[in-house]
Amino acid sequence: MRNSDMKIGELSTLTGCSVQTIRYYEKEHLLPKTQRSEGNFRLYDDASVEHLLFIKRCRSLDLSLSEIRQLLELRYSPNAPCDEVSHMLSSHINHVRARIEELINLEDQLASLLHSCPSQGTVKKCEILKNLTATQKIMS
């Protein structure tokens, strides 16, 4: 890897993040401000690559931008207690478990709808559409 003078396109290629995503992370203050070239291009270095890959890994774990921001603050505060990181991850796991439950319930509802109609006949007699209509009336 190079030490510096890397433009945003090269950073994008090295990390697999789009240029738009990199700019978004800069706008959200997840990436620190960079130096500028004489032509006013942003210049990045190996630390920028490492920083962006950290963010990308956090996003792959579905961590929110605010969670990533907190982890970055902790990452650059080496004397901070590690239990803050563990607590955040534990909280995120609970959030993921709740979402899994919601998705399981959604799957059950969709399967029930699917099995309500034998897929034969006309749309006029489609039980799926009738059930969806009935649900809409109940919800409104």
Image (spheres, helix red, strand yellow):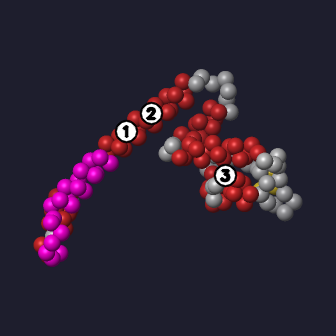
Q: Which mark is residue 62?
A: none
For the record, the magenta segment spans: 103-123
Which residue is nearer to you in this view: 65 or 86?
86
Asked if the residue under mark 2 is in contact with the one under mark 1, i.e. CB atoms within 8 Å, the reply is no
Q: Residue at x 54, y 46 (%)?
A: 59
Instruction: Name the front one of labels 3 and 1.
Output: 3
Which residue is nearer to you in this view: 31 or 46?
46
Q: Residue at x 66, y 60 (%)?
A: 19
Question: From the viewer's perspective, is residue 50 above or below residue 18?
Answer: above
Horizontal and vertical percent for residue 73?
63, 35
Residue topped by disc 2: 91
Q: Residue at x 43, y 35 (%)?
A: 93
Q: In the picture, residue 51 is in which quadrant?
A: top right
Res. 107 in view: yes
Residue topped by disc 1: 97
Q: Name the residue type under label 1.
A: Arg
Q: Residue at x 84, y 63 (%)?
A: 39
Instruction: Name the front one of labels 2 and 3.
Output: 3
Around disc 1, counting alpha carbons within 10 Å, would you say few (fewer than 14), some (14 to 19), or many (20 or more)?
few
Sequence-earlier tag: 3 or 1: 3
Left or right: 18 in relation to 33:
left
Between the residue at mark 3 and the residue at mark 1, the CA separation in whole angstroms equals 30 Å
Q: Name the residue type under label 3.
A: Thr
Horizontal and vertical percent for residue 137?
17, 62
